[in-house]
Amino acid sequence: MADPIDFYFDFSSPYGYLASTAIDGLAARHGRRVRWRPFLIGALYKQLGYMPLEQPGKRAYFLHDVPRSARAMGVKLTIPASFPEALIAPARALYWIADRDEAKAAAFGAAAYRAYWSEGRKLADPQVVAEIAAGQGFAKDMVLAALNDPKVKDRLKAETDAAIAAGIFGSPFIIVDGERFWGSDRLDQVVKWLATGGW
Amino acid sequence: MADPIDFYFDFSSPYGYLASTAIDGLAARHGRRVRWRPFLIGALYKQLGYMPLEQPGKRAYFLHDVPRSARAMGVKLTIPASFPEALIAPARALYWIADRDEAKAAAFGAAAYRAYWSEGRKLADPQVVAEIAAGQGFAKDMVLAALNDPKVKDRLKAETDAAIAAGIFGSPFIIVDGERFWGSDRLDQVVKWLATGGW
């Protein structure tokens, strides 16, 4: 089987969510699997010294474009009142699950993303994260314990640092055989790259 | 005939160029014409206090994504050695032409954009701009005189200020019946909006 697609994202990124609804399917149609690689975009922005939505005009556009793009894709999406907020627990949980079963990590990632952006659930809450992980067969108390495990915390920090060191500067960021694509609006090019091997 | 589509762009914007190669055709297929509205993105960035490509990782991505996106669209594009540079003369010329013949202004805009991004011509040079305008039937010495006319200079300043006041924050920016689309990667949504009237 060909190398997996790397799917970098932050759970707080709505364009990441839009990409997440399509990434596993398009990969599978080209004989690929997807490595879901959450990172903390707040750490990235802190290091870069900027906040993308601090301009009022750009923020207003974003708040209009996100639901419009979701409707264009047929994806149910509501921007939570708490947006933007750091979503750390689901990212920690995903790596903990990935170390046990990578397919379940992808299914958990998709379910957690959907819970936040389509179902209005409080994804910053460890209890909610544990419930979603339970849907993949993991005991809730084990998940809750993992979320407070220093090794799990360090893992997410290390993954975030590695993503930044690899030049990831936004969410979603998709890498196919070394070729980098930034944004849900590059999904068409990702599909074309998978189909043709490049152009 | 339905209202025209407003196409805001800076000649120095490669994504604006990509959009320019498609905008008139897609508009015509939906019974629309296009108002080409160049503005000076440098003035916008100065007012916003940021430069989008100052981060090394983002700049490297941009320099790779632009030609890749051009190839995906079948558009010949080479990033000039002088990029990024202010391209003021063609923007002034376009408004001067538009006051005489808006269809010729669109044709001039397309030809000037192509000259810079596909043909390697020095679009910052008033002589080159005058030659391109001559292709639309305007005498070169009249164009060269217009480029130094304070009224023409003020017109571009006023158009740039108006674009910024209208909340335009990037290039290209396309407005269809009040609906705003930012970026050449929103062309699919522009076409869908024209076909359906919104969703």
Image: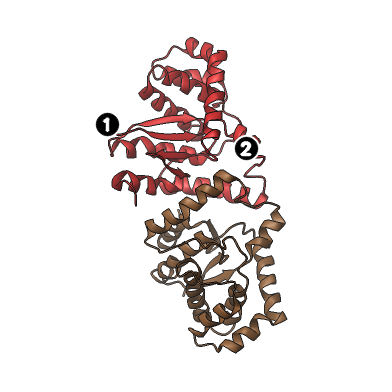
Chain colours: A red, B brown
Q: Does residue A143 sit above or below B64 in this rendering?
A: above
Residues B134 and B78: in front is B78
User: In the figure, is residue B49 to the left or right of A137?
Assistant: right
Q: Residue, x 47% and y 34% (percent of image)?
A: A8
At label 1, counting other C-alpha atoms closer than 10 Å, the crowd grade (few under 14, some 14-19, many 20 or more) is: few
Q: Quadrant of residue A40?
A: top right
Q: Is residue B181 at all visible to an observer of this figure?
A: yes
User: In the figure, is residue A113 to the left or right of A82?
Assistant: left
Q: Mark 1 — residue?
A: A1
Q: Residue, x 44% and y 63% (percent of image)?
A: B77
The percent coordinates of residue B91 (x first, y second) are 60, 73
Residue B43: assigned label: none
**What chain does badge 2 belong to?**
A
Residues B182 and B125: in front is B125
The percent coordinates of residue A195 (x first, y second) are 29, 46
The percent coordinates of residue A41 (x first, y second) are 57, 34
Q: Tell me the CA gap for discs 2 and 1.
A: 35 Å
Which amino acid is tagged 1? Met
Q: Quadrant of residue A43?
A: top right
Residue that lies at the very extreme toward the front in this rendered image: B81
Q: Does residue A139 sit above or below B83 in this rendering?
A: above
Q: Who comes first in sequence, dot 2 or dot 1?
A: 1
Q: Does residue B136 sit above or below A191 in this rendering?
A: below
Q: Residue, x 51% and y 72% (percent of image)?
A: B121
The percent coordinates of residue A177 (x first, y second) are 37, 39
- Element under disc 2: helix
Q: Does residue B18 sit above or below B88 in this rendering?
A: above
**What chain does badge 1 belong to?**
A
Query: Disc 2, disc 1: CB below 8 Å?
Result: no
Q: Mark 2 — residue?
A: A45
- Element under disc 1: loop
Q: Residue, x 55% and y 34% (percent of image)?
A: A164
